[in-house]
Image (spheres, coloured by chain):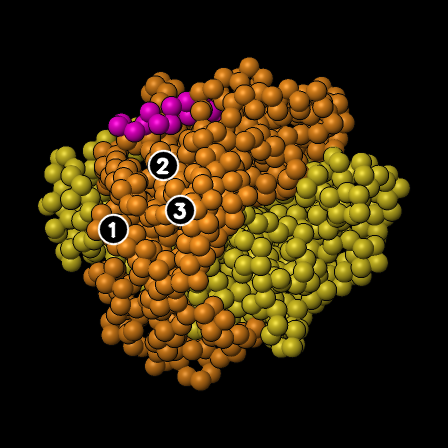
Chain colours: A yellow, B orange
Amino acid sequence: MTTEKSKKATVSFDSLLRIFTVPEGPDSTLTQIEHALSHNVNEFLNDHIVTEDVPLTDIENDFAHARIPDEPEFVSTHTDHLLNKVVAHSVHTASPHFIGHMTSALPYFLLPLTKVMTALNQNLVKIETSKAFTPLERQVLGMLHHLVYQQCDAFYTPLLHSAEHSLGAFCSGGTIANITALWVARNQALPASRDFPGIAIAGAHAALRYYGYDDLAIIVSERGHYSLKKAADILGIGQNNVITITTDDNNRIDIAEFEHTLTKLKQRNVCVFAAIGIAGTTETGSVDPLPEMAHICRRENIHFHVDAAWGGATLFSNTHRHLLHGIEQADSVTIDAHKQMYIPMGAGVVLFKDPCAMHAIEHHAQYILRAGSKDLGSHTLEGSRSGIAMLVYSSLHILGRAGYELLIDQSINKAKFFADLIEQQQDFELISAPELCLLTYRYRPHQVKDALTQATALQQAALNDTLNELTIFIQKRQRENGRSFVSRTQLTPHNWSRYPIIVLRVVLANPLTTEAILESVLEEQRAIATQATLLMQRIKTMCQSILVQK
Amino acid sequence: MTTEKSKKATVSFDSLLRIFTVPEGPDSTLTQIEHALSHNVNEFLNDHIVTEDVPLTDIENDFAHARIPDEPEFVSTHTDHLLNKVVAHSVHTASPHFIGHMTSALPYFLLPLTKVMTALNQNLVKIETSKAFTPLERQVLGMLHHLVYQQCDAFYTPLLHSAEHSLGAFCSGGTIANITALWVARNQALPASRDFPGIAIAGAHAALRYYGYDDLAIIVSERGHYSLKKAADILGIGQNNVITITTDDNNRIDIAEFEHTLTKLKQRNVCVFAAIGIAGTTETGSVDPLPEMAHICRRENIHFHVDAAWGGATLFSNTHRHLLHGIEQADSVTIDAHKQMYIPMGAGVVLFKDPCAMHAIEHHAQYILRAGSKDLGSHTLEGSRSGIAMLVYSSLHILGRAGYELLIDQSINKAKFFADLIEQQQDFELISAPELCLLTYRYRPHQVKDALTQATALQQAALNDTLNELTIFIQKRQRENGRSFVSRTQLTPHNWSRYPIIVLRVVLANPLTTEAILESVLEEQRAIATQATLLMQRIKTMCQSILVQK
C-alpha cells in the first residue's frame, strides 16, 4: 500500500503524483471492495446496505459540515467511511424486491466496462477528445433510429457519418432529450425568413411579434411527465402553455378533446408547435393512440414528439412492438437507455425522423465545433459529455435484439401475472391494468367493495379519502421495513368519477423479481394494513353505516 | 466462464438471468482488462491506444451499419472487438503529452470508486432512489459554496439540508450549469406579481409585454464560452441578445465598453438581466475584473454570474486564490469538477449565493418531488442523475484542500515555466501569457519578428495569414504524429491590431506533464515547421522583401 504509506499528515507533490500513477495495493480496502463487487455485486449490496429505514435527519448528521477538509485522508480510512456512511445508507435499487421505480439490476459485464469507459475518460463534445467514440455514438444513434423508424440501409449508409446530418443526440437523460426535441420543434416553427433571423437568433418575443402569434403552446395528455412543464419554462414558452388534455378510461389522451383544444387555441391565435404522445406514461405505463395523434399533427403541421423514455425499449420485442404502433410517424422520439435498456444512470437519447431537423439548433465556435466538422457537440444541448454510448453499444451487441426481446417479454408477462394475482385477491383493487410492465393498485378491505358501489358521492369521497390515508400508510411502512419497495402516486380514475385516488405503483423491469416476491409484496401490504388499526376501524364503521342505510 | 458457455447461438431467459447474476469468470478477457486497468492504467492505455492518426473515415467503416445485431455475442468476443476497434482508436486524454484540452490523468482511486458508484446505480432525482446520496450531494454543494463564498458556519448549518433552500445543483457539465444560472436570473428578472404569474408560468412573450420591455439581453466579453449563445437560444432570449464586449490587452472585458453598452441597451428599452464574468476563459485562461463587474451589476440590479467552469478550482490554492478575487460577489458561479478537480467526465456544479435563488425554477409533481420534500430533482434542470457527487466527495476528502492546492500551484508554475521557455526561443512567440495554467503561442521564424515590426499594415496582414497557415499545419501534423497534442484557436490580439491570429493553445493541468515533455513539444513543432518547406520559403521571401524596402 505505497499510496497510503507515502501520505503523511502533510501532503507533498511527490505523494500526490503517486495518486495519479500508483494503483491501490492488492490488500487495500478499496481493492477488496472492487473484488467483492466483481465477485458478486448482489451479495456485496445485500451485505452492505442497511435495510431498515434510518431517518433522513440521522443520515444528514453525517454530512453536516460545509468546510472542505484541509488535510488529505488515507484512501483506506475514507473507504471505510464510505462503506459505513454512504453505501450502508444508499438504496438497493438493484434488489428484486425494489419494484417501485424504473431502476433495476444491471448486467454484470457493465461494471468492468464502466471502468474501461472511465479510464479512457473521453469527451464526446469533439473528435479531438473522442475519436472512435464519435463514429461509435453515431452508429448507436443510427441503430436506435432504425429500431424506431426502420428505414432501409440506403437511407442510413450516406447519413450515419455525414457532417451535415444527425439522427439524434445522446443526453444525460429523458428530460434533456425532451427539451432538445421541443427546442428543435420551437425553432422550426419560428424559423429564419428573408427579413427575420429566426427565434434562435432573435428570441421568443421578437419571433412572436414577427410571426404575429399571441402565444406558443405544447399539447400533451394529463399523464405527461413533469419535465415537460420544466421544458416549457426553460424554452421561454411558459408552464401554462403546456396544455394538458384529459385521458380516457385507459389513461390515454382523449383524441376528441385534443381536436377541440386545437381549434380553441387556433381561435386564440396561439401557435401550437408541438404535441407529445406518451409511449409508456410514468404513472400508469399507458401508451397514447399514436397513429391518431400523428395524423392530426401532420394535418396541422405540428411537430409530433413521442416521449418513450421508459417504454421505447418495447420496440426490441417482435411480440410486443405493436403496442407502440405509430411511433414511427413521430418527428422525434425520446428513449432512456438507463431505463428498460439496463444501462447505468445517465444515458438518454433523442432521435429525429428527419436527419436535417437538428440544423435548427446547430452551433459552432472557433476552437471547437468548427463548421463542417463531425464534432457531436455542434448539436447537443450539453457540452462536455462522457462516452456512455459505449455501454449502450456493448449491450446492443452482447444482448442483441433477441436478448432485449426476452427481457421485455418477461417483464410484460410478469406484470400480467401480478395484475391477475391482484384481481384474485378479495382485498386488493387493480386501478390501472398493465399495458407494458407497469401497473397501479391499492389495498381495499373486502367490505369496501360493496360499500363503495352503494355509497352516495359524498360517502364515496369520504371512503376514498380514508383509503388514500391507508395507502400512504402502507407504502411508507413497507419502505421503512426495508424488505420491499413499491412507490405511490395519485390518479383520478374514471370509475371513481375522477376523484383523486392514491395508488401503489410497481414497475416490473428487474429480471430477478420472481412471482414469489410479488406474492410476498401483497402479503406484507395486507399485514401492514391490519396494523393500521384506527384507519381500518374507521373504514369498517363507514362501510357498515353505508350498507345499513341501503 | 459460465456466462459464455451458457450462451448458445440462440438466447434463453436462463442464460440472460446469468448475465445479471453471474460475474465474468476470472480468466475472461473482460476481467483481464479490468486487472490490467487496476494494475497500471497508464501502461494499459499506452499499450492499447494506437498513436498514429488513423483517418476518421477509416474508423467510420467499423461503425457503418444501422441495424442492431439480432443475436447475442459472447462477452469475450465483444471485448476483443472493443479493444481493437474502440479503445485502440480512442484519444489518450490522460497522456502527459496531451496538453491541448482540459482533460487530464485521473487519480487512481477514482477507478474503483466509479465501479462502486455504478454498482449502487442511485438516481439522485429523489430520496427514494438515493437516500444518503442526497445529503452527501447537498454537503458537497455546501463545501463548494463555502469554497467560493466563505460564509460562516452559522450560515451553513441551518441551510445545508433545508427542504426550503438550495445552495446549488449538480449538472452534467458547465453548459447545463450556465443555463441553470441564466434560467434562474431570467425568471428572477421577470417574476410573478399581483396580476402576472411570472415568466416561468406565462412565457417570455407575455412577460416582456407585461413588463413593457422590448427585449432581454445577457452581457459577456467576446471571450465568453460558446455555450452562452446556446443558452440564450434555449432560454428564448436569442443568440443575438448575448451582447459581447471587447477585451483589453489581457483578454479581459473592457469595463468602459461594458458601461457604455449598458447605457445603450437601457436607452433601447432592453432588460439586461445577467452579466457574466469569466474566471478562466476557454481560449486564453484569462480572468475578468470581477470586482468591477460585480459593482456595476449591483448598482444596476443585474444578476452577476461567474463562469469559473475551468478556473474555479484555483480557489483551493491559498497562494493563487486572489487571482479570482471578486468571485465571492457573484450571484451564481459555475465550476466543473471534471476539469481542474480531476473527476471523470460528467460533473458540473452551479452555486448560488442566495439560498433562495433556486425558488425561481422550482417544480413539483405528484409521484416525486412532492412539495416540502428534500428531493434534489425539484430544482435541477436534469431529471434522473447519477451519484457522481460521491466521486467529488471522496476526492475532497482524499486529496483535501491542501492536496488540490498543490495540484493547482504546480499547474500554474508549469505554465509560467512554459511561457518563459517560449519567450527564450528566437522562433516562437508567446501570444497570451498564462494567468492560470493556460497559454497560447505560435511558431514564428526568427526573421519574421523584425519584418513584422517594419511591415506596412497590408504586409503585416499577408505575413500573419501565412503564419496562420503554418500554425494550422504544425498543429495538425503534430496531432497526426501522435506523440503530443496541443489545440489551436483564433484570437485577435491587440498587439496585432486585432488581426485574426491562429494560435497554439496548451492547458497544463496534467500533473504528469514534465518540463522535459514541454521542451520536446516545442522541438517537435520546430521540426514540423521546417518540413513545411513551401510555407517557410514564402515567409522567408515576404520577410526579405519587407526588410529590403526599409
Distance from disc 1 to disc 3, alpha carbons, whole Å, reads 22 Å
Estimate the x, y position of residue A103 in percent, counting from the top left: 47, 55
Residue plotted at (69% across, 25% down)? B270
Residue A156 is left or right of residue B465, and the answer is right
Distance from disc 2 to disc 1, alpha carbons, whole Å, reads 17 Å
Position of residue A451 relative to residue B47, above or below, is: above
Question: Which residue is tagged 1?
Answer: B519
How many numbered circles does the render carry?
Answer: 3
Question: Which residue is tagged 2?
Answer: B433
Examine the image and state in which quarter residue A334 appears: bottom right
Question: Which residue is tagged 3?
Answer: B448
Q: Which residues are magenta?
A: B318-333
Mark 3 falls within which chain? B
Label 3 environment density (alpha carbons within 10 Å; few <14, some 14–19, many ≥20): many
Distance from disc 2 to disc 3, alpha carbons, whole Å, reads 20 Å
Mark 2 falls within which chain? B
Residue plotted at (30% across, 68% down)? B48
Q: Of callouts 1 and 3, which one flags the residue occurring earlier in the amino acid sequence?
A: 3
Residue B428 appearing in the image: yes
Residue type at tag 1: Glu
Residue type at tag 3: Val
Mark 1 falls within which chain? B
The front one of B56 and A420 is B56
